[in-house]
Image (cartoon, coloured by chain):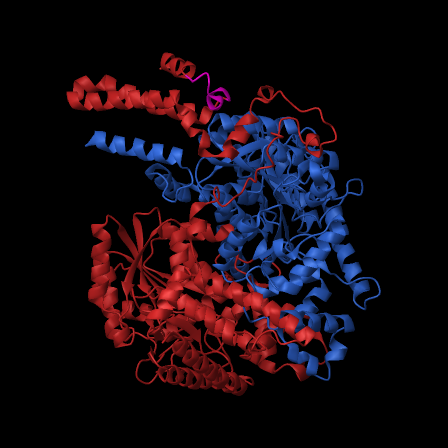
Amino acid sequence: MTILNHVIATWRNPNCDFCNNSNRLFVSKIQFNCKFLILFILMNPIFFSFSNYLIMLFLLVYYISRTLTCNTYLGRSTKLLSTLGNIKPNTQTTIPLNTNNILNTKMDNQDISTPYTKSLTLDNMCPTVKTAQYAVRGELVIRAENIAHLLEKQKKEGTKLLPFNEIVYCNIGNPQQLKQQPISFFRQVLALCECPELLNSAHVDKVFPADAIARARELMASIGNTGAYSGSQGVASVLKSVAAFIESRDGHAADPSNIFLTDGASVAVQRMLRLLIRDRSDGIMIPIPQYPLYSATIELYGGSQLGYYLNEESGWGLEASELERSYNDAVSKGITPRALVIINPGNPTGQTLDAANMREIVAFCHRKRIVLLADEVYQENVYVKETKPFVSFKKVVMDMGKEVEGLELVSFHSVSKGFVGECGKRGGYMELHGITNEVKAEIYKLASIGLCPNVTGQIVVDLMVRPPVAGEQSYDTYVKERDTIFDSLKRRANLLAAALNGLEGVTCNQPEGAMYAFPQIRLPARAIEEAKANGKAPDAYYCIQLLEATGICVVPGSGFGQKDGTYHFRTTFLPSEQAIQGVCTRIADFHKNFMAKYK
Amino acid sequence: MLWYCLLCVIYLDDIKYQNPNIGINSVFTLTLKFFLLISANNPFLGDLYDRSLELAKLLEKQKKEGVTLLPFNEILYCNVGNPHLCGQKPLTFFRQVVALTEYPELLNSPNAESMFPRDVVSRSCRLLSAIVHTGAYSSTTGVKGILQNIANFIEKRDGHPSDPSTIFITDGATQSVRSILHFLISGRDDGIMTPVPQYPLYTISIKLNGGTEVFYYLNEESNWSLEITELERAYQDSVAKGVTPRALVIINPGNPTGQILDESNMKEIVLFCHKKSMILIADEVYQGSIFTDERPFISFKKVVCDLGEQVSGIELVSVHSISKGPIGECGKRGGYMELHGFSKSVIDEMVKLASFSMCPNVIGQVLIDLMVCPPVEGDESYPTYKVERDATMNSLRDHAKLLVDTLNSLEGVTCNQPMGSLYAMPRLRLPPAAIAEAKSLGREPDEHYCLQLLEEKGILVTSGNAFGQREGTYHFRSTFLPPMEKVCKGLKEFHENFMLKYK
């Protein structure tokens, strides 16, 4: 072997800078591969046929010729070359003597004829970061922010640059940005926890209700101090509260050691996907349309997206046969489905699943031995409680009992949605069910890298799962605030869906849950042509024009995925009750003009 | 069949070599990546930490039942720099502002004035007008007004301009480091140069993203100094192995080593990075906890800007946090990074990556604002703020001195005087009998020492192998946060017994 190394090392092309600059990376690779080949060739006559022998010989010749002609690799990366140029400083000898030239003050062996090459460029960054796309904060939002700058200017200078005065951000479910009021009790407790000295102030009982004070004292006793790192899984008492909440919701036991608090549910989803995905041959089944967090994260970690379509005609229903189709398609392509993502209530589609449907899904996962990821962050946003109340997958799985024994389920919940709407606090949790202890230990390890979820967010989680109860001083206010928000959301959902359905070529399923309407728009052929000529997806083209004409920022359906040839957009119905009517009329006016223009 | 598999692997490997940036890496690297995920170890956990959890449970039982199960009554946590857990008081002004921004209705209460100083009220109003609501998602990189304040802070500190659009607020500085490493690493061929000993966040994140660690050693004999020749050696070694170093991590003030770099040394480092076209990652989270007057903290941003044209184009990431120093708000998860010299297209991609998690938590952002604009002379809260800040710093300084003096008085222990950060990293010269016993138990010798320290005295420190150390040397890291008198007394007794036992 050493002789071989020597031979290959001296076979380097003497005219090739690349070789002479000791491209050890390349040479070592070739040496490695050749060693293997020689080894196999030597073994070959004993074990294998003559034809294989020939193949190996051919490969050996191929590699050696590669070494000799490695000039061809010169174009690979200028960066690598400049790095290699630095390995042997002596090889760079000519330094111009013009001392006035500012470049000459650079370090001795920096290649002075070329400008500094950036170390990090789009070409050499982590490739999956580049290919991952996140539509809800994509091109449209950037455009909206630019328009917001213009609006500020318009305000300052008093000139009329745009036909509207403010941007209405309907692209993201961000309730408090659109003036949803926070629950007072929550904020009172938070204020007391953040500044415990208030508890000792003389007027505290005049300013804060007694139960807020009591709750803050209780939380401070178990947390200690909001400024200290908590355990990586979360504060023990908060984990217990979450478990008790799940238990009372589902009627089945929940174990606090299976719960992980996170900085928002997004982080929980990212962590699970990180763990599930090994490479491109691991697939994650996601609905189409879906919330783009999933597609982006799967791409980021180098997995494969396996879409299953929701049926728009039956109110975005989920059909088991479609799951089966998607699964089989993946398997036939050599991809192993590892997990099924269900968003219930749906985002962006707003449907809620009924229990029978959920049982089919659970049985499907159990049969195929795949992990069920249940995104239930909108569980409080259900507007058809009488006919289709929210049922958690945890409950369904437990109810089915023996039939689906061993099924692995991860459920996500968050403080960002519902009537809580505390997005900015970044609080969320996931509950693991049926996951083995070894894997749980790995999840814990991943969590510990980020040290701990933010403690304020953890307090909000605790408050969400343990709101004031009847008899406590804050209870009436809490109920009133909660119901006001909820009833108003329900009214706004109906209003928006009705307004959209009144437009030419637009159909919109009635949202049963979540915060979004996802109407289908049938665009005139000319609009589609023009969009394509501009290099835009037709629905994106529509949304950009909507933004520029009305200041309403929505997300095109292409960001969520949709059946080919159909076009949608997603809008929240979060603008306040005074504002939503205006939003509806502005969309209607725009739509009318748009249709007329492209008729 | 075997041949075809082999052919396939070699072919894919070849493709990868020609085209290292393609999305689908070879089967090799990808399976490797999976196994690496499994092998990425966080040394903060491990045996020591697990054992401390068990002991904590026993202690609770001991307390409840009144029986003596263990030779101590409490566990002294010296393993993580978690100041508030160890009794450090939060800064009053900071918490008052946070409380008011959380619950602005307090301003309407007739008693508000008696509860809060005027500057707290005015600061909260200003913050609220920038944030609008602490319960809403902010922009991905942070609230605009707060980013501007950070830029002003950097400008004032360094005397060089800073651009708010290159600043990213994150959930703790950890998140900044993780995202920049995620960005840099595409495969095993990408190396990141990190110090030994080092804060293990770097090793674990590099492993997790499938890159290669390139270690350079700090020189313990000259107070953990950083030598350029050593950087050069590490660089060359890595290139020889076919790994391209893409970035150099410098922790200044050092963690776990506590040293501060001087300016001429920093200049050398910057020039080195520039020469090699490497990104410089400057972990400066301990810039607020410095106990020496002889060597002030200088940021890498300042050094880079001072060098000017000489290092034009260099890419520098500086990281800062609210978790350390006199603020110590670890639980709030607030941090930021400033990207200097990066191309616009790369920054856009960074914004995209950050947007996957929507935004950093808003309370953390509020605290960053307070950190970069603390009360100034003349403000109503200034006297309290100053007293609190100085008290914390003085106590840290005294405790550091106490710990280091105690350690140096022990047989076979030497410890450099930390100039900054929250840690001391003493070197242990263990008796051969102790080393032999540890090896027979399948443990690292320093881990063996730390475990016994925990069992006998309830003092939890982190063993040196978690941070990396020169072969054949043994260390541990201890914070000097908790009641140091108790820790020092326990350490002394334990060490004397230990040395006797293995003599």
Q: Colour of chain B?
A: blue
Q: Is A492 on the left or on the right of B167, as rendered?
A: left
Outermost residue, top direction? A3
Tell me residue A490's x, y (percent): 42, 84
From this view, report whether residue A36 is shown above or below residue B401.
above
Q: Is residue A19 magenta?
A: yes
Describe residue A45's horizontal placement relative to residue B108 as left or right.
Answer: left
Q: Quadrant of the N terminus of chain A?
A: top left
Q: Nearer the viewer, residue A422 or B117?
A: A422
Which residues fall within the magenta stretch? A12-21
Which residue ends up furthest to the left in the rendered image?
A: A49
The percent position of residue B339, horizontal first and vertical second, equals 61, 49
Left or right: A507 as drawn, with respect to B198: left
Residue A359 falls in image quadrant: bottom left
Q: Quadrant of the C terminus of chain A?
A: bottom left
Q: Is residue B209 left or right of residue B217?
A: left
Q: Is any part of residue B435 visible from this angle?
A: no
**Quick one: which chain is red?**
A
| Residue found at x 45% / y 35% | B189
User: What x and y, as percent, mark residue A45?
Assistant: 18, 17
Up-down: is B386 above or below B13?
below
Q: Position of residue A379 (x, y in %)?
A: 39, 74
Q: Is residue B23 magenta?
A: no
Indicate whether A77 appears above or below A171. above
